Image (cartoon, helix red, strand yellow):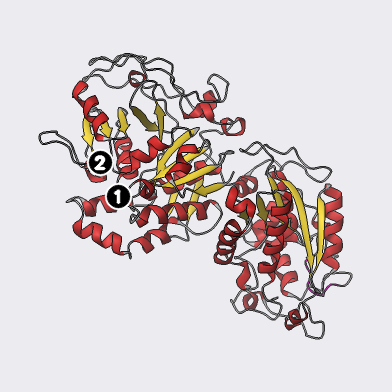
Amino acid sequence: MNVLIAKTKEECKLWKDYIVVVDVLRSATTVCQLLQAGKRDVLVFEDTQTAMKFREEHPQFEVYSELEFPAGFEHKDNSPALAAKADPKTPALVVTTAGTKAVFAAQQACGIFMGGFCNFYTLATHLKSLSRDVLLVPSGLFGDSEDVEDFMCVSALKDFLQGFGNAENTVSDIKNTLRYMEFLKQGPKTAKEDAKIAFQVNGLALIPTFQFVEGQDFAVCFPYGEQAPRHLTGEAPMQSSQEPEVTMPSLEEASMGTVEQQPQRPSSAPAKTSTSLKLSGLFRGFLNTVRKEEEELKEDLLKTFNKKGEHTVTIKPVMDPVDSILQSGEPAAKTEEKMPAVHEASRGGKKKAIVLFSGGLDSTTCLYWALNQGYECEALTITYGQRHDREVVSAEFIAKKLGVKLHKIELHFPWLKSSSLVDKNQALPDLTLEQIEGGKIPSTYVPGRNLMFLSIAASLMDSVGANAIVAGPNAVDFSGYPDCTPAFFKAAGEAINRGTKMGTSEGVEVLAPLMRLSKTDIVRLGAKLKVPFELTWSCYAGGQKPCGHCDSCKLRAKGFAEAGIKDPAVED
């Protein structure tokens, strides 16, 4: 699954995979708040004319909009604060400057979501479960390009899906912008209340999704996981005093083949009366488009995000791929003897990844992780004069065992001898774990190593048509290298997406599945994936057996000891 950010309106109109419309301050938060308040008769319109015409025929609907209407036309502001006070029994229609226009531009998409910071983690968790590509649409494309909060939110969402950053830091940045200050001072009377709701991260833990109805000028809005109200899809009359009759199938029921898997677009318009909507066709909700692997998800799967004590929220139903393996009671699928079956990517091809592969503990775990996730892998091993070239033997042996194609590249840069990892005349550091983790960059740092490696991997990726690069940096138990940090990999990923054919045409992922794991968790993950620890090599000193004194040996020993697993690569 690739995640891209929309650049133009036309891109949204042509997109056929999933779309997320992001309108932070108003539309997304207002719609989330209406659904949270219990409303299930919620319609969205593209413009005021169609909204007014509908309202004339259905006066029981209350209107939420910041747009101008003729004098005497009763409506509420597009305000999350006002939506929070809504009567759940009163149906509502929403028409806005940008958010609902973006929804209507997305009619070719197989599924449409709406979000912002108010449902950030719930939305992110669901997006991680999707196999088809996702286009993030800042509603500012359809309204005011100065709505920086929308553009910052989609950027934060993409980063988070790729393992970097969090919503809270981005919210803090937005609150320091001129746009935010002007909204509080010059916005509507409810501006402060609206902003408070909009920036309470995951305070509205649901996902609005949309169903376009045949022959009508509106889309039905309802929470993902529920079914659209029958009286809005033509299966029952719509009356002003009637409470919506809602059938809510579980994800498990949806996976039993009782719904179609591909949505069908309307072709003709039925007649409409003032007392009922005679609509043809049954509800073909968003669940119809979910692929087989998504249908197997269960409602009882939980995911907890804990951002270093700053924000804790429980969301469902899907787990992160790494966490799901770590927490699974069953071993992961074996990959030692042959590569697992490769899943088809959303664009009709295969998921293909270039794995930076040294033969060490971390990179081998990454290779097994990528195979477990369904990627067709090609491994890239780079020598640069490192004194521990013994690791290359491990890389070659493991790649051969797995049947993975291995590309071996040699670099000859004399200036790299500034590192004790290359210059054998320098002594390797012999530090305590506390000193290793103290943040000081050690002499084993190789200048620009990961920058060089990622550039070479990007070139290989472009030439073979891969859509992902997998690397094994770790920012928890590591020696303080500046090119092993989330910030570096975020910047490198952006550069690769802007500077390669695959990146600019389709979008690529730079995946770092171990970035947030401790060495202990990496060992546990490797054990779940059946990584042949005895074949991996970590020692910086090289030789025939690990030295036990270098940074890498000590961090590896710590990981195995805390995981309660014997390291088969170390003799007693």
Q: Secondary structure at mark 2?
A: helix
Residue 385: image location, x then y, percent = 81, 74
Which image quadrant for residue 240?
Answer: top left
In the figure, is residue 185 to the left or right of 167? left
Q: Which mark is residue 197?
A: 1
Residue 222: image location, x then y, percent = 37, 31
- Residue at 52 percent across and 48 percent down: it is 4
Q: Which mark is residue 466?
A: none
In the rendered image, the vertical position of residue 472 relative to residue 80, given as above or below = below
Q: Which mark is residue 84?
A: 2
Of helix, strand and loop, which mostly describes the magenta segment? loop
Q: Secondary structure at mark 1?
A: helix
What is the count of numbered marks? 2
Q: Are marks 2 and 1 in contact (CB under 8 Å)?
A: yes
Residue at mark 2 to residue at mark 1: CA–CA distance:
9 Å
Q: In terms of depth relative to the viewer, which is nearer, 291 or 68?
A: 68
Work out which quarter of the rendered image holds the N terminus and state it: top right
Give the residue at the far right of this rendering: 544
Q: Please give the range of residues in magenta.
A: 538-542
- Residue at 67 percent across and 37 percent down: it is 344
Indicate which disc, 2 or 1, sits on the residue closer to the N terminus: 2
Give the residue at the far left of this rendering: 72
Q: Amino acid at mark 2?
A: Ala
In the rendered image, the vertical position of residue 313 relative to residue 483, given as above or below = above
Q: In terms of depth relative to the viewer, which is nearer, 499 or 169?
A: 499
